[in-house]
Amino acid sequence: MRDVLESMTKTDLTSLAAELEIVGRSSMTKAQLIDAILATQEGGV
């Protein structure tokens, strides 16, 4: 899953983060977005 996310653009990741209602997404780096998306999908934060 991480490989798929890493192949996406930061804009696409930010859009996905918005769909997942991740707070603070607009100020996150690409790596932070990937970590936050993975954590959310794993039932984390």
Image (cartoon, helix red, strand yellow):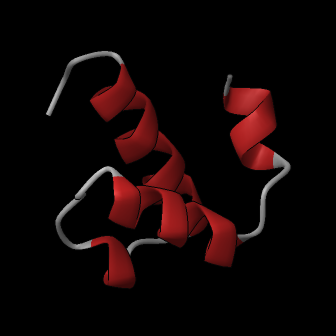
* In the foreground, 42 or 32: 42
Q: How many marks?
A: 0
Spot occupied by residue 22 in the image (x, y as percentages of width and height)? 24, 57
The residue positioned 33% from the left and 71% from the top of the image is 25
Spot occupied by residue 1 in the image (x, y as percentages of width and height)? 68, 22
Image height check: is 19 above or below 18?
above
Spot occupied by residue 37 in the image (x, y as percentages of width and height)? 42, 42
The residue positioned 51% from the left and 69% from the top of the image is 15
Q: Residue furthest bottom?
A: 27
Along the horizontal axis of the image, is 18 left or right of 9? left
Image height check: is 32 above or below 45?
below
Q: Which quarter of the picture shows residue 13?
A: bottom right
Q: Residue furthest front?
A: 19
Q: Quadrant of the C terminus?
A: top left
Along the horizontal axis of the image, is 29 left or right of 8? left
The residue positioned 77% from the left and 68% from the top of the image is 9
Image height check: is 1 above or below 38?
above
Image height check: is 44 above or below 37?
above
Q: Which quarter of the picture shows residue 42?
A: top left
* In the foreground, 5 or 21: 21
Along the horizontal axis of the image, is 12 left or right of 43? right
Q: Residue furthest right?
A: 7
The residue positioned 37% from the left and 25% from the top of the image is 41
